[in-house]
Amino acid sequence: MSTGPGADSAPAPDHDDDRTARATGTGTHTGSGTHTGSGTDTGAVGDTPRRAGMFSSLKIRNYRLFFAGQVVSNTGTWMQRIAQDWLVLTLTGSSAAVGITTALQFLPMLLFGLYGGVLVDRLRKRPTLLFTQSAMALTSLALAALTLTGHVQIWHVYVAAFVTGLATVLDNPARQSFVAELVGPGRLQNAVSLNSANFQSARLVGPAVAGVLITGVGTGWAFFLNGVSFVAPIAGLLMMRSRELHAVTPSPRGKGQLREGLRYVAGRPELLWPIVLVGFIGTFAFNFPVYLSAFADDVFDGGAGAYSLFNTLMAVGSVAGALLAARRGTARLRLLILAALAFGGLEIVAAGAPALWLFALLMVPIGLVAMTVNVTTNTSIQMATDPAVRGRVMALYMMVFLGGAPVGAPIVGWITDTHGARVGLAAGGAVAALAAAVIGLILARVGNLRLTVGWHGGHPRMRFVPRERQEALTPVG
């Protein structure tokens, strides 16, 4: 099954490159005998150049509409996150209630995420997104009405958070899969990277706007504006040209499709091990609210201002990481392993930072490599997956990635409370680095590869090569 016009026109790799690609995820072949393109090692399909321009996906009209809608909607989403937490604190005065609200929003993904992926594979993506975006808009508007009229109660917020979580069970895998239909495989990493930059940029703007609204006119108007913001993505979806989509035929309804998706992932190391890796990283190393708040209050005594500074600088690094990924145009699993190693190492270094200013500056490269891990995993998994099961695979990925943080938060919180913030952050970084090293060796072994370290152009260079090639280059005697 082709991912769209032109997917079969990419050049086939030679024998050695194909062997390397199978182990590193840089070229993918489905189990059913259908090739999904040249894989992520080739940043091009058809006439798309391997190293595409940083904004090349925006040349596609349908993607421009999608991107513009997300600019508005993501800003509204970040506004609502801040306003929702503040409303809960206002109603209850309890941080635990804020945690319950967050848990309720993530709980549906943990409980029903895999089933959402099954449904997404059976449904057309654009109508599905129209439904989920409309549902989230109505939920925000209902919460706005209750807040503005003074009738809001804490259980209303709990219900709104849970309903929003239910919508994301379908919205997340559908939105992730729909990007491939918008741009095709050749520009997939560029589009995924631009989406990430979009979301992180909104993270810089949305909370600031929410703060102005909350202090000026109240939380209810933040909910209202978020509800209205969904008009932009809905209008974009309606204005798209169907004939220009790289549409995938929905999978027919059948028994055992959930088990089929799990078996599909289990039988492909290039899918299984990156998901395992982000599971470890998401659970133990991505709990930044726990780590950064502890460093701001307990280590540096900087209060809310320091916490805000840490998050802002990390968002800056994340935007830079996303834009660099968009410029690269390729997604290789060796880059994922190296980025995960760097991420863990930087967290360990940050844990020992003696001064606030140094810790704050380290948030920029940490945000950059964290986004590199995120974008590379997302793109390589999508490129390595048969479109017929992409919804189920992306649902599993999102469930592991998004569900890891709330599961790991009590663990890293206990470590941080018991042994201190520095030990907690260093432990999270150590888990990330160790997981990356072990999974990198597993992928190399699966692909019959060996690690080589040498110099290239005056710089150290590390890469995996087939064992036969390395043995042929090794001098005898």
Image (spheres, rainbow, N blue to C red):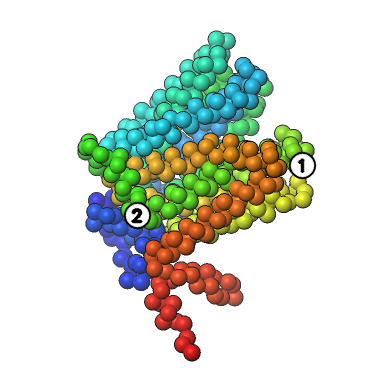
Q: Position of residue 284 (x, y in %)?
A: 56, 45
Q: Position of residue 169 (x, y in %)?
A: 40, 33
Q: Residue under label 1, please give it.
A: 300
Q: Which of 250 and 65 is in front in this view?
A: 250
Label 2, secondary structure: give it.
Answer: loop
- N-terminal-most mark, 2 or 1: 2
Measure the C-alpha gap from mark 2 to mark 1: 45 Å
* Residue type for callout 1: Phe
Q: Residue under label 2, please give it.
A: 268
Quarter location, residue 137: top left
Quarter location, residue 135: top left
Horizontal arrangement in the rendering, residue 154 relative to residue 267 (left or right): right
Residue beneath the point at 65% across and 45% down? 424
Residue beneath the point at 30% across and 42% down? 259
Tag shown at residue 206: none
Q: Which of 255 and 198 is in front in this view?
A: 255
Residue beneath the point at 50% across and 58% down? 438
Label 1, secondary structure: give it.
Answer: loop
Residue beneath the point at 35% across and 67% down? 19
User: Would residue 156 be seen by someone viewing this image from the given angle?
Assistant: yes
* Residue type for callout 2: Arg
User: Would residue 54 be seen by someone viewing this image from the given angle?
Assistant: no
Q: How packed is label 2: few (under 14 Cα within 10 Å), some, or many (20 or more)?
A: some
Q: How packed is label 1: few (under 14 Cα within 10 Å), some, or many (20 or more)?
A: some
Q: Position of residue 330 (x, y in %)?
A: 44, 58
Q: In this view, does 475 lie above or below 398?
A: below
Verify CB contact (< 8 Å) between mark 2 and mark 1: no
Q: Nearer the viewer, residue 85 or 404?
A: 404
Q: Where is residue 293 in the image (x, y as percent from the top left)?
A: 68, 37
